[in-house]
């Protein structure tokens, strides 16, 4: 498994916050159809997934894509960030994990405090 830190502002500009919910995993790791429970990190802190719509800055024809960013927090984070708010993710970590059945999956994570509202746009001078 490889991890990389993404320069979010240069790669995506600003994202649009779409919400946060519990990260769910099967209660029995050997049975993917078992009752889902909230995932926890190594310190037993609940995990959450924040969904953010992003646009790659690498291509002028880039499309919007939703990414889910896993964060750990004892309580539901981002209560003060409304859906639709422009956000920045500091120190966004992107991981690449090899799948058992072939191929790879990409995942994102960040510290809960690293998803924050973006600074408002300044009006151009002379307006």
Image: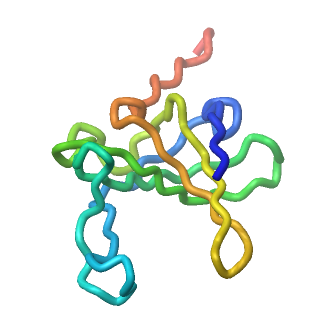
Of residue 25 and residue 1, the one placed in the foreground of this image is 1
Q: Position of residue 67 (x, y in %)?
A: 54, 56
Q: How is the image coloured?
A: rainbow
The answer to whether residue 101 is above or below residue 61 is below
Q: Position of residue 28 (x, y in %)?
A: 30, 79
Of residue 77 and residue 12, the one placed in the foreground of this image is 77
Q: Position of residue 107 (x, y in %)?
A: 56, 56
Query: Which residue is at 43% across, 55% downward?
Result: 51
The answer to whether residue 27 is above or below residue 59 is below
Extreme top residue here?
A: 125
Of residue 37 and residue 8, the one placed in the foreground of this image is 37
Query: Which residue is at 61% across, 50% downward?
Result: 95
Q: Quadrant of the C terminus?
A: top right
Residue 10, image quadrant:
top right
Of residue 122 and residue 26, the one placed in the foreground of this image is 26
Left or right relative to 104: residue 41: left
Q: Position of residue 29 (x, y in %)?
A: 36, 76
Left or right relative to 99: residue 58: right
Query: Which residue is at 52% across, 24% downward?
Result: 121
Query: Which residue is at 64% across, 76% downward?
Result: 100
The answer to whether residue 84 is above or below residue 115 is below
């Amino acid at each position: 498994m490889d991890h990389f830190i993404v320069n979010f502002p240069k790669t995506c500009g600003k994202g649009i916050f779409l919400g946060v919910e519990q990260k769910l995993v099967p209660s029995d790791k050997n049975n993917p159809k078992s009752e889902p429970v909230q995932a926890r990190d190594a310190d037993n802190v609940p995990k959450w997934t924040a969904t953010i719509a992003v646009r790659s800055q690498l291509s002028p024809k880039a499309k919007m894509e939703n990414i889910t960013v896993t964060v750990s927090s004892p309580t539901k984070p981002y209560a003060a960030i409304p859906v639709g708010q422009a956000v920045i993710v500091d120190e966004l970590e992107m991981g690449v994990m090899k799948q058992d059945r072939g191929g790879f999956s990409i995942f994102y994570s960040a510290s809960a405090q690293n998803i924050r509202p973006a600074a408002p746009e300044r009006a151009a001078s002379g307006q």
